[in-house]
Amino acid sequence: MAAYLQWRRFVFFDKELVKEPLGNDGAAPGATPASGSAASKFLCLPPGITVCDSGRGSLVFGDMEGQIWFLPRSLQLTGFQAYKLRVTHLYQLKQHNILASVGEDEEGINPLVCPQVKIWNLEKRDGGNPLCTRIFPAIPGTEPTVVSCLTVHENLNFMAIGFTDGSVTLNKGDITRDRHSKTQILHKGNYPVTGLAFRQAGKTTHLFVVTTENVQSYIVSGKDYPRVELDTHGCGLRCSALSDPSQDLQFIVAGDECVYLYQPDERGPCFAFEGHKLIAHWFRGYLIIVSRDRKVSPKSEFTSRDSQSSDKQILNIYDLCNKFIAYSTVFEDVVDVLAEWGSLYVLTRDGRVHALQEKDTQTKLEMLFKKNLFEMAINLAKSQHLDSDGLAQIFMQYGDHLYSKGNHDGAVQQYIRTIGKLEPSYVIRKFLDAQRIHNLTAYLQTLHRQSLANADHTTLLLNCYTKLKDSSKLEEFIKTKSESEVHFDVETAIKVLRQAGYYSHALYLAENHAHHEWYLKIQLEDIKNYQEALRYIGKLPFEQAESNMKRYGKILMHHIPEQTTQLLKGLCTDYRPSLEGRSDREAPGCRANSEEFIPIFANNPRELKAFLEHMSEVQPDSPQGIYDTLLELRLQNWAHEKDPQVKEKLHAEAISLLKSGRFCDVFDKALVLCQMHDFQDGVLYLYEQGKLFQQIMHYHMQHEQYRQVITVCERHGEQDPSLWEQALSYFARKEEDCKEYMAAVLKHIENKNLMPPLLVVQTLAHNSTATLSVIRDYLVQKLQKQSQQIAQDELRVRRYREETTRIRQEIQELKASPKIFQKTKCSICNSALELPSVHFLCGHSFHQHCFESYSESDADCPTCLPENRKVMDMIRAQEQKRDLHDQFQHQLKCSNDSFSVIADYFGRGVFNKLTLLTDPPTARLTSSLEAGLQRDLLMHSRRGT
């Protein structure tokens, strides 16, 4: 209930008396001329006016003499005789030029029985008067009663008449014709009917019926006319009206205590307007109430108006929407209030017509601005259909005013109304303070509803939602948009929601917009829902599943190791994304690098072993890291196992893995693993596979396994003869009695001639237990062999000398004696020589045709040429190496082992000098110089070492 005493009062209407048109003599037909020249200026209606109405550009009056008067805008009053006695009710339709009237034509002892309803077509004439298209009695029965009110539907299909006995008749059909209309009693009651009004809502027509004690509504467009009791409060005659669409066509009932508004099925708001109500009228969004002060004793609504002729009456014009009084004034004895030509006309008992003209919009706005009544100004501007730019300017001014006063809630509401006209940043900057975040939220919400927000606005709105913890609004915002309609940075939104603890909302965005990393981060780090995170990874495409398992695999393995291991097995063998719990078998399988997931099992050796064994069985071509890790894991288990049987089984597994051939390329790594875990069988196996015989020997030496030392030398001595030398040195350093083993070693050294005897003696000299008898047989045999070798060398030297002497004699003979060619056969075809023939000093003879066929040059013997060419190539190669002197000197100075450098050059024949038969006598001198150079180099090498 709203108390009107708190409503502001304004003077939005100008009041003046209606003047007669120019040229009029000032006396209306039937009017009594007023005295004085001033009185003739104002319009004066005929006396005895009993009823009034307006519409179709005219004010319509009915008087006690049965006449109906029309006052058009030209103020030329016209009328005609409608009834013989009096006119009691008029209803002028607004959309049709039809007038309905109720009056009395018959005189008699009981005039109550003869009221007549007449329908007038004002567009047609009958003898100069409007055409009466229909006449029928107002009272359907024979019981006497009085017509209290009348209303007609604008579609001309309904007319209702109320009576003082509480009954209401309904005329249904074309009211302008008798044969198309049917009259029936709609309502019966115990209280006089004081008001009727039709309301059209779509195809449904309602009829409001108000009496002095209650309010009801009927649905008259259908059958059975269902009734709804709306209230138990009524009103007097002419104290009800139907509002316009601005008030949703509500039925207004003006009681003495309050003014009530009704919908067809319920009561609406009420307003506490005090005073005894006399007239209620609706005009262009305003409620006009004529009331009498309560200090004056109220009189019955059905008493004679003559008894009220001296009352002072107050006319108030209320704006129910904006809650203010647009105008208030005092009249004496108001007959009725009419609305036409955009103004209000108040008819008083003295025949005067007072016009209330509403001020123009700009004037009213200026009045409101002066009083800082921006809200009223806005509502007023809307009602006057001010353009959107003008409204936005008012909204902005009002918002700035409220903001300056500290009313931020009100200010933001006004700024909201500027959306689409005012730059949003102007408003946003004002509400960035944390205490005003709810105001900013309201503004941004409206900005989005009108589809005028950009991505930054949306991100800011999400921040506001999270700060305010308004989960319902937040959920509505993020879940009502499809992906194509999202205009904000989803990743930023997810971050904001996650930071604020709105995990479900963040998950929704992450899942629907394929932000897999954010979805998993929230599930694993915030919600700790590891099962759901693993399930989600299993649905992802291969690339995303692989990357996310690398990222989050350790966390998942720590909490749900079995399920995580199972997913990794599938990911590394034949991965297919699962769809709603089912694997997509139609999609091609993918396979990840299993070695990259090994770190995930850092603290889960049992699952790691299962994973590695699965990969080695299902996928033999797994990366080398799989086998390396599996070996390390098996060695760890073997090293820590206490049960002998289990330890033996683990030992066999490790050896089997080493012998699988998977460690050929990573020999060193496997060897290090075996050494770290003291897996000696594996170490020895790898030494043998890697041909590391020295290490095998060293191992047995460390463990003083003498027999194994000899065995290693016997098995691998052919490949590495130095093993025997090491074995001899090893036994020589032992103070124990190792004569048996030393004898075996010396025997092999002697057979293979692996060491000089002097070195053997020096080696055994370190052993205090070794006597000469140990190496006596060795030395004797060695000296015998050396003696035999010396004899063989001397025999070979003698043979070389003889050969040299023979060659020198041949050379001398060739130089000094003639050569006699006595060969009788060709050296090529072995046939008898025939002239012409070719002979060479080397002793070979050829047919000329054979020589020409096989020789490459005329100066070379075809038989001796291959051997001579080899010799010449060697000579040329040595000649080319003569220029290596500087390089040799440089290497000799920089090398740590000068002897090896010299030996290398000796091996390549750099220092060899071949003396040819064609050399001049100076060759000997050159040879002696080179010999001296060799001697100097050897001396230098000895000093360097």
Image (cartoon, rainbow, N blue to C red):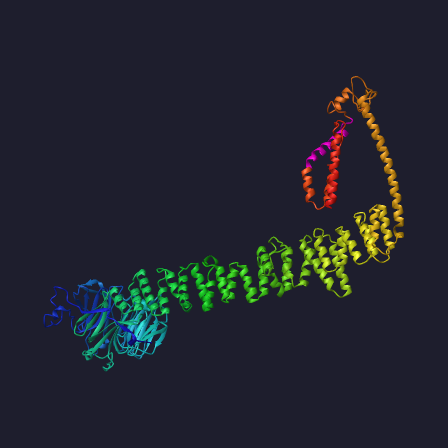
Tell me where residue 151 sits by quadrant: bottom left
- Identify the residue at the far top of this view: 835
Q: Is residue 737 left or right of residue 487?
A: right
From the viewer's perspective, is residue 812 above or below residue 403? above
Give the percent coordinates (x, y) of residue 292.
23, 78
Give the percent coordinates (x, y) of residue 678.
74, 60
Is residue 104 visible to the viewer in this orientation of the structure? Answer: no
From the viewer's perspective, is residue 524 above or below residue 719? below
Residue at x 49%, y 64% (from the top left corner): 497
Q: Main secondary structure of the magenta part?
A: helix
Tell me where residue 315 sits by quadrant: bottom left
Q: Is residue 506 left or right of residue 132?
A: right
Q: Is residue 196 left or right of residue 930?
A: left
Residue 867 falls inside the magenta stretch: yes
Is residue 656 visible to the viewer in this orientation of the structure? Answer: yes
Give the percent coordinates (x, y) of residue 576.
61, 56
Pick whichever, 309 or 191, lies toward us: 309
Residue 237 falls inside the magenta stretch: no
From the viewer's perspective, is residue 212 above or below residue 706? below
Pick whichever, 552 or 35, lies toward us: 552
The residues colored magenta run 863-884
